[in-house]
Image (cartoon, helix red, strand yellow):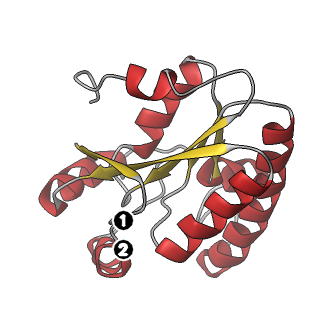
Amino acid sequence: MFEKFNFDLIYRERDDFTPLVVMMCGVAGSGKTTFSQQLEKAGFVRLSIDEEIWATNGRYGIDYPIEKIEEFKKEAESKLRNRLIKLIHDKRHVVIDFSFWNRESRDQYKQVIEKNGGKWKLIYLKVHPDDLRDRLKIRNNRFDANAFPITEEILTSFLTSFETPKGEGELVIEN
């Protein structure tokens, strides 16, 4: 999926003094987890809200009622934010595998990262909605933490509410 992307653009921003935190940004199905896993192979610690919910609460709609998802997202994000701060203090490079769908959230995380001695890189994975639909049809057949079921209704809601980063220091990757 990212065969043509030069990951050295990110790797060369790492140093031993200021931890680099890569913030993934994109709609469900844009490739955030796949991209994050590449960075993880290069030594980044990957924080995934979906995997945290899966590990703590189980499977969406099976091990817990669908209505609990927002509560579980808040709990998972709080836990991962605390872990992020500790990782920055430990001088570890991190990739945050969240959607960062709104600017307010992106700005809050940038402040947390900088306040705790890190630097950030915002990666926006831009994908055409038709390509997202095709990917999600395949992904919805999987059964793992990173395959949260996305219906057409949910995707439309995501696309409508997604705030595309503009002028936020983002690196845009058309995927």
Asked which secondary structure carries label 2, the reply is loop
* Residue 11 in the image, given as x and y percentages of width and height: 50, 22
Residue situated in front as seen by the camera: 116 or 42 = 116
Q: Amino acid at mark 1?
A: Pro
The total of numbered circles placed on residues is 2
Taking 24 as reference, is 45 above or below it? above
- Residue receiving disc 1: 165
Image quarter for residue 7?
A: top left
For label 2, the residue is 162
Disc 2 residue crowd, few under 14, some 14–19, many 20+, Cα 10 Å: some
Q: Nearer the viewer, residue 81 or 106?
A: 106
Q: Residue 2, relative to residue 102: is it above or below?
A: above
* Residue sitting at x 36%, y 61%: 27
Q: Residue at x 29, y 53 (%)?
A: 136
Q: Is residue 30 left or right of residue 98?
A: left
> How many C-alpha atoms fall within 10 Å of the one at disc 1: few (<14), some, or many (≥20)?
many
Which of the 4 image quadrants contains residue 152?
Answer: bottom left
Q: Where does the N terminus fall, quadrant-wise?
A: top left
Q: Position of residue 85 (x, y in %)?
A: 81, 49
> Which tag is nearer the camera, tag 1 or tag 2?
1
Of 137 and 8, the residue lying toward us: 8
Q: Secondary structure at mark 1?
A: loop
Q: Residue at x 71, y 33 (%)?
A: 18
Measured as percent of width and height from the top left, residue 151 is found at 33, 69
